[in-house]
Image (cartoon, rainbow, N blue to C red):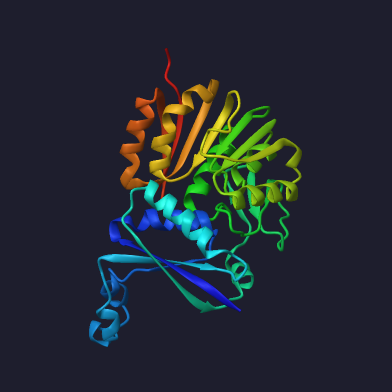
Amino acid sequence: MEWTDLKITVPRQWADTAEAIATGISGGGIYIEDYADLEEQVQAIAHVDLIEQDLLDKDREHVTVHMYLSPDENPAEVTDLLNSRLTAAEAPYTLELSGVEQEEWETAWKKYYHAMEIGSRLAVCPSWEEYTGSRKVIRLDPGMAFGTGTHETTSLCLAQLDRLVQGGERMLDIGTGSGILAIAALLLGADSAEGVDIDPMCVRTAGENAQLNGVADRLQVLVGDLSDKASGTYNIITANIVAAAIISLCPHVPALLADGGVFIASGIIDTRRDEVIEAIEKAGLSVDEVHELRGWVALVCTAKEG
């Protein structure tokens, strides 16, 4: 059976944004085509003259992110979602579709996706592996929704939840994806959680993952645009989404935070860190902590005193 190769081509400076958006939709079935530093990559093993000329002739100013869609997925729906998120991020891009031979993605994932420990209390583990430690274990298999713990932005958020959740909290996860952040909070002792995502596929996946982890009775997952499905106030709000979406969301966050509540914002490329911080502070929040990991940023924020 034939898969679909959906190619997103962007200027190099937009590569991280395109990768984050593609990862958020595909959950891992992506490949990055970037020839900008081709010579530097091979310098240690071969003279540049030994590189094939067709590679040397490749476009160095643009990067192509390949998303691989299985035969049972609707390319038109995924394309519409990509168009929406890339446009919201104000990224210049082109999209192209082509067919590729089916790959054994599940087998490939099992080669690279293993149990991982985060913070002092959490571990993320796929269903096919055993975990014998004493940590709270999130059982999560790769799927179409973003969030398996392997991406830097998810790891950053999980580390902060591991540190901040003390028990009894009400939590809101905006752009919930796989539901991993809400599930982590519940396993760490939060009383209840709500997950909101604009993608119905993510909402379905988050619900399935909640069932797998035994927290479905405490997690409500809804289809919605950012915070429009939120109800009341929350002790912890997470938003692991792109920078432009966080900037748009910021004015709504203070009204959703309970007294002493914390807002964790991530999915932010380091080049947009200051822009996001400015928007958060303008909305009436204080950025108390900035955490960075391999070019990605997570912000821990609270309401300004007074």
183 or 164: nearer the viewer: 183
Quarter of the picture containing the C terminus is: top left
Identify the residue at image location x=32%, y=81%: 45
Camera-nearest residue between 298 and 64: 64
Q: What residue appears at the point 33 percent right and 59 percent down from the top-left corner?
A: 93
Residue 190 makes an appearance in the image: no
Q: Quadrant of residue 273?
A: top left
Q: Position of residue 150 (x, y in %)?
A: 54, 56
Q: Position of residue 212 (x, y in %)?
A: 74, 51
- Is residue 186 left or right of 156 when viewed as pictured? right
Q: Position of residue 249 (x, y in %)?
A: 44, 34
Q: How many marks?
A: 0
Question: In front here: 102 or 54?
Answer: 102
- Counting from the top left corner in percent of width and height, residue 119 is at 57, 44
* Of the pair 11 and 296, the residue shown nearer to us: 11
Residue 291 in the image: above or below residue 262: below
Q: Name the image quarter holding residue 14.
A: bottom left
Q: Quadrant of the N terminus?
A: bottom right
Write the residue at 38% across / 30% down: 280
Q: Describe residue 250's horizontal placement relative to residue 227 as left or right.
A: left
